[in-house]
Every structure is written in structure tokens, then in C-alpha cells.
């Protein structure tokens, strides 16, 4: 597994969640990385906060790139993806959206959701 | 991460990380039992879905549900509780130590078990809810309410949690209609009065949600409600094959952009079926008669909403959590006295 988190943007996965700023940024990340999990979250959402350490762990332990979208500062982007609740989790593989789920998921289910595409 | 989980035997494992599990963890950790806390599929439990808790002793100005949980977790960790992501799928309680099989395949072995798995939001059973849950249908107003600015929304239910959802949603939605199957609320007077007094909240009495309209692309667009002057309309629908109008049942379609469920909770005890732990018809774990958290299986204890169909408060869950840890500690001590071994405190034994 790639462990180099300090390199400049490449197609390698990152070990820490990336914070998305706007639609272009998300599109760039999705096209640069093989498997991307996007977490649409809000600071005021309890389940989102409980999910945070889980996603930090998955960023470090899986080959997927974990990205986070703050829905309050990215309302347009959230609307584009039909987000009507938080957390909403999307998975992209090879640039295509392959999964969408609203509500927190247990760590092991999230991991298997990701590993369906990374392995 | 998984290495060694099969050989270590914990003194106490707590299943669930809501207020009951955390309170049990604080007590067990302070007793040097080094409890393992399995956080479950909804870490932090129901309090993470609420806004302010106004009736928890010691917080005159109220405290955020999330804050209470985070502080509780810190407190448990400070005394040495060990937290782990994990959901119990199956429990083998006939042999000792007990074995818990987790969703990821790992096995946890433990001498004492505290079940604090709580209860999860009940679904109404309306047509379309499977497809639209998360797409405009929600069990968590605090999570999803802000997506309904300017919408008309429904809240289904008549208890305190339905009133709390309605009051929260009224900050965002144009109108909130509480749909309740009877003509009086179960909610406490203070919550019912706040909802009744709110200009954007109205009530649809003796009515139930039958069907949800919409699609995943568009979200929720509307709903079909049924009502009957005597309440519980869907029961009357089910009970009779006669035409609806003849039964006094009125069906109507409303345009709404969001539907929020506040119809109570179902205890999370599926993994205990067939284990010897007794379950009530409602699914609640049954503790022994009297003031105790013991169950029909020695060494298994219950705490919080999973064993409490009546009170279901943050403060009562914290209370039964502490009781379960004290009961578990006393039981472990009695076991070690009987077997003549050292007191079961300190580091967990390795086989």
C-alpha cells in the first residue's frame, strides 16, 4: 500500500482525508484517483462526527482516497449529487459513481464497500 | 488489528456505546476491569441524533446530546476503557468464556457481558420507504432537516421525539405537519405545548402515512395519508375488505418535500435470539425480577433502552449502565472467590 502522503497530487491514494472545495476540485480528485469515497457531512450532524475517526482510519488503511465535502459551504455541490441528508457517502471507481448511501455505516461495512473496488 | 482477539479473554465486554454503554464503561474502568467497548453500527447511540438535552442532571442550561456522548467517551477512556469499532452478529453464551462473533469475522471472548445495544428508530412500513429512506425520508431531523429549507414536511408520531423533530424542522421548513394516529399526543406536556404554540406546526389527528411518492432522483414529492374519526386508520384498512368510504376511512394525497419518522424505537436484540437470554415480545431484553441488571444467563447484564421499554431517558440509561457495571463487578468477584483464584482485576488474562 502506498504510504507516501506528502507527495504532490498524483494518482496514488492519500492517507488522510482531503477536504473538497467546490465541484471542480471534486472532479479533479475523482479523475486522478482510482477509488474515491466522498463523505458529504456537516459540522452540526452527530452521526457525521462519529464517522470522522472511522474515515480517518480507512484513509490510512485502505487503497481508497477519502474526501470530505462540508455541505454548508458546498450547497450547490451537494444539490448536484442529490444529497438530502448527512452523512451521505458516495464511492467513485475509475471516475464513475458506483455507490451512494445516506446515513452512517459501521466501519466494517464501509471497508467492504471500498474493498469491492480496490481489490 | 485482529491478531490475538481469539486468545485474549476480557473480564467485561460492553456492547454498545450510547449513554448506557459509556456509563457502564466508566464504572467498569474505574474498577480496573479494563472493559472493551464494542461501538456498534450507530456509535454514540440515540443521543447523537438529538439536539439539546434539557433534563440531564447538572446541566441547568441544557447540554448537546453529542457533547454529552463525547465527554462520556473521554471519561471512560481516561480510566482505561478500550473502544473498538465492531458490531456483534452472533453470541455463544452457553460455554464460558462467552464468545461474540463480530460482523468482520473476529471473535471476542469475555467473562462478563453487558448488553447496552439500545434501540434503533422504527420505520412506519409505508409503501416507498425502503426506496426513499435517505432521499427525503429520514429518522433524524437534526441530520437532514437543513435540506428542507422552504419545504412542507411531515413528522410521523406523537411522542416527545416527534415533537422535538417537529420543533427542529420548523426552523427550516415552511410548514410542519405532525401526523398522529390518535387524537391526543403521548408527548410530555412541555413538549406538546411548545409544538402546539408554534405557528408553523400543525397537526393531522387520527391519521397515518400509507404511501410515499417520489424517486431517488427527485426526492420525496408527496404522500398518501389515511384518516378515520376513531383513530388507527390503517388497522381498520387491514381489518375489513369493505370499501374504504363505507368504513369512514378518508384517503388523501399531500404534496411534501420531506417525511420524518418519530414513531419510536425497536430494541437491538437480534443477536441474542436463541442464546438463553430472555426477550420480551417487544424484543426488549428481560432482566431478572427486582432492582438488578442480571439476566437469565449468569454473567450477562442489560443496561439502557435495550432493557427499558418505559423510561428511556438519557439519565436512566446512565443509571442502569452504572448498575450493570457494578453487578458485573460483583459477579466476577463472586466467581473468583468460588474458584479460589486471584481477584479478577488488573490485566486481562492471556491463554
Image (tube, coloured by chain):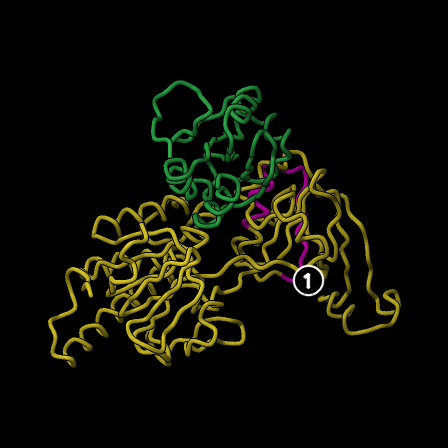
Chain colours: A green, B yellow
B262 relative to A91, above or below: below
Pick the front one: A40 or B245: A40
Give the residues drawn in magenta, as a range: B164-184
Percent across and percent down for residue B253 are 80, 50
- State the image quarter where residue B61 is shown: top left
B180 in the magenta segment: yes
Q: Which residue is drawn at the image coordinates 49% and 39% (left, top)? A: A118
Left or right: where B167 falls relative to B275: right
Callout 1: 10 Å neighbours few (<14), some, many (20+)? many
Left or right: where B186 falls relative to B207: left
Instruction: State how many labels appear.
Output: 1
B177 in the magenta segment: yes
B284 relative to B150, above or below: below
Q: Secondary structure at mark 1?
A: loop
Percent across and percent down for residue B348 are 19, 62
Percent across and percent down for residue B150 are 67, 34
Percent across and percent down for residue B142 are 52, 43
Q: Which residue is drawn at the image coordinates 44% and 72% (left, top)? A: B285
Left or right: where B224 falls relative to B176: right
Pick the front one: B282 or B114: B114
Q: Which residue is mark 1?
A: B181
Quadrant location, the N terminus of chain A: top left
B287 relative to A65, above or below: below
Q: Which residue is drawn at the image coordinates 16% and 60% (left, top)? A: B347
Chain letter, disc 1 residue? B
Amino acid at each position: 500500500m502506498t504510504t507516501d502522503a506528502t507527495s504532490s497530487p498524483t494518482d496514488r491514494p492519500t492517507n488522510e482525508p482531503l477536504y473538497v472545495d467546490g465541484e471542480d476540485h471534486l472532479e479533479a480528485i475523482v479523475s486522478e484517483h482510482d477509488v474515491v469515497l466522498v463523505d458529504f457531512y456537516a459540522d452540526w450532524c452527530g452521526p457525521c462526527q462519529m464517522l470522522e475517526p472511522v474515515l480517518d482510519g480507512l484513509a490510512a488503511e485502505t487503497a481508497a482516497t477519502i474526501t470530505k465535502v462540508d455541505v454548508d459551504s458546498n450547497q450547490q455541490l451537494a444539490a448536484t449529487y442529490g444529497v438530502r441528508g448527512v452523512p451521505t457517502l458516495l464511492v467513485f471507481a475509475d471516475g464513475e459513481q458506483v455507490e451512494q448511501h445516506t446515513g452512517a455505516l459501521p466501519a466494517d461495512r464501509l471497508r467492504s464497500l471500498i474493498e469491492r473496488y480496490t481489490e | 488489528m485482529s491478531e490475538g482477539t481469539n486468545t485474549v479473554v476480557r473480564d467485561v465486554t460492553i456492547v454498545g456505546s450510547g449513554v448506557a454503554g459509556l456509563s457502564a464503561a466508566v464504572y467498569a474502568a474505574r474498577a480496573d476491569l479494563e472493559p472493551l467497548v464494542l461501538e456498534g453500527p450507530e456509535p454514540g447511540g440515540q443521543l447523537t441524533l438529538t439536539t439539546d438535552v434539557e433534563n440531564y442532571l447538572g446541566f441547568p442550561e441544557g447540554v448537546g446530546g453529542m457533547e454529552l456522548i463525547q465527554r462520556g467517551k473521554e471519561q471512560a477512556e481516561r480510566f482505561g476503557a478500550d473502544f473498538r469499532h465492531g458490531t456483534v452478529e452472533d453470541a455463544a453464551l452457553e460455554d464460558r468464556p462467552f464468545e461474540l462473533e463480530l460482523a468482520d469475522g473476529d471473535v471476542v471472548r469475555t467473562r462478563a457481558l453487558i448488553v447496552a445495544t439500545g434501540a434503533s428508530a422504527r420505520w412506519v412500513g409505508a409503501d416507498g420507504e425502503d426506496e426513499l429512506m435517505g432521499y427525503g425520508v429520514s429518522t433524524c431531523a437534526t441530520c437532514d432537516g437543513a435540506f428542507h429549507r422552504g419545504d412542507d414536511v411531515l413528522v410521523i408520531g406523537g411522542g416527545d421525539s416527534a415533537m422535538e423533530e417537529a420543533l427542529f424542522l420548523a426552523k427550516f421548513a415552511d410548514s410542519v405537519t405532525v401526523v398522529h394516529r390518535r387524537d391526543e399526543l403521548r408527548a410530555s406536556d412541555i413538549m406538546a405545548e411548545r409544538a402546539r404554540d408554534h405557528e408553523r406546526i400543525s397537526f393531522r389527528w387520527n391519521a397515518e402515512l400509507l404511501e410515499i411518492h417520489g424517486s431517488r432522483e427527485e426526492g420525496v414529492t408527496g404522500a398518501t395519508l389515511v384518516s378515520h374519526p376513531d383513530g388507527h386508520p390503517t388497522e381498520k384498512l387491514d381489518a375489513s375488505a369493505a370499501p374504504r368510504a363505507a368504513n369512514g376511512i378518508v384517503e388523501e394525497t399531500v404534496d411534501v418535500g420531506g417525511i420524518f419518522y418519530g414513531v419510536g424505537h425497536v430494541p437491538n436484540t437480534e443477536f441474542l435470539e436463541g442464546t438463553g437470554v430472555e426477550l420480551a415480545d417487544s424484543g426488549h431484553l428481560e432482566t431478572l425480577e427486582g432492582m438488578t441488571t442480571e439476566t437469565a444467563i449468569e454473567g450477562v447484564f442489560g443496561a439502557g433502552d435495550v432493557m427499558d421499554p418505559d423510561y428511556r431517558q438519557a439519565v436512566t440509561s446512565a443509571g442502569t449502565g452504572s448498575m450493570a457495571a457494578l453487578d458485573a463487578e460483583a459477579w466476577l468477584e463472586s466467581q473468583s472467590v468460588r474458584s479460589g483464584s486471584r481477584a479478577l482485576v488488573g490485566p486481562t488474562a492471556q491463554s
